[in-house]
Amino acid sequence: MNIKLEKHTMTNSVFLHLFPGVVIILIYIMIVPLVTKNGFPNDTAMYITDIIGLVPVELGILLYVTKRKTGTYNIKTLFPYLEKAAVKEYVVFALIMAAWALLVSALMEPLELMIQDNIFSFVPTEYIMGSYDITTFSEDKLILTGLLGIIANGFIAPIFEELYFRGYLLPRINLSPIKAAVVSAVLFSVYHFYSPWYFISRVLMMIPLYYWVEKKKNIRFSILAHIISNVVTSVSFLLSIM
């Protein structure tokens, strides 16, 4: 039986969205020097952070809330958006979202580069994911990074983020569905403190996705879209070094 849905105050929503991001960026900053010192690209630091930072914090909050509310650790009781859909609907949805993401990425790339170069130029290059010469790393370490990326970035991070942000937090934003989708997209974009220059494109990509989750009461749509997007990125990295 699901827990009675109690809406969060906006202050609580903001805190619960951003707190994991603070933990993640702090761990990432600490790990990058260790990773690069051992001959790995900085992407590896983020993938490790996904496992030792993202999962414990977000799963920990879910387990804590569930235990406090029900006396058990069955986090499924926290998720009201578990309606089902036909396979065809998932396929069509995935294709539409992929096309939308490609369009937004293409249109926003010049603006993102400008924002990165002019507003966030103070960020050290070694902390910007992907900002390295791939030829300076051994093939073995690049392959290990790519494989870790598929596991951590392709599956682990998307699943736990969607359960936490869209499964738990989105339904509890005390606003209309479209406003809740906008707030969720904005806060989730800010949560990525390690790459703020992608803020606008993330928001534009996510608003229709999160509204669809609200409309269909089904977080499987966002889990699917998130996994596909991240797996494509990780596989593309592997293909680029082969």
Image (tube, rainbow, N blue to C red):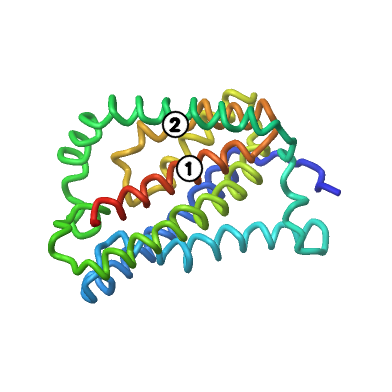
Within 10 Å of the Cα at label 2, are there few (<14), some (14-19), or many (20+) other Cα atoms?
A: some
Q: Residue at x 73, y 35 (%)?
A: 84
Label 2 sits on what residue type? Ala
Q: Which residue is mark 2?
A: 98
Lower sequence index among marks 1 and 2:
2
Q: Residue at x 28, y 28 (%)?
A: 106
Q: Residue at x 17, y 58 (%)?
A: 134
Q: Position of residue 21 (x, y in %)?
A: 45, 53
Give the image quarter of residue 178. top right
Q: Which residue is mark 1?
A: 228
Q: Is residue 210 above or below residue 33?
A: above
Residue 127 as seen in the image, left or right of residue 222: left
Q: Residue at x 82, y 43 (%)?
A: 4
The circle on residue 216 is none
Q: Which residue sits furthest right?
A: 1
Q: Secondary structure at mark 2?
A: helix
The residue closer to the viewer here, 46 or 187, is 46
How many marks on residues? 2
Q: Quadrant of the C terminus?
A: bottom left
The residue closer to the viewer here, 227 or 6, is 227
Residue 1 as seen in the image, left or right of residue 207: right
The residue closer to the viewer here, 174 or 32, is 32
Q: Position of residue 217 (x, y in %)?
A: 70, 32
Give the image quarter of residue 90. top right
Label 1 sits on what residue type? Ile
Q: CA distance from mark 1 to mark 2?
A: 8 Å
Residue 240 as seen in the image, left or right of residue 133: right
Residue 127 as seen in the image, left or right of residue 194: left
Q: Secondary structure at mark 1?
A: helix
Q: Position of residue 202 (x, y in %)?
A: 40, 35
Q: Are marks 1 and 2 in contact (CB under 8 Å)?
A: yes
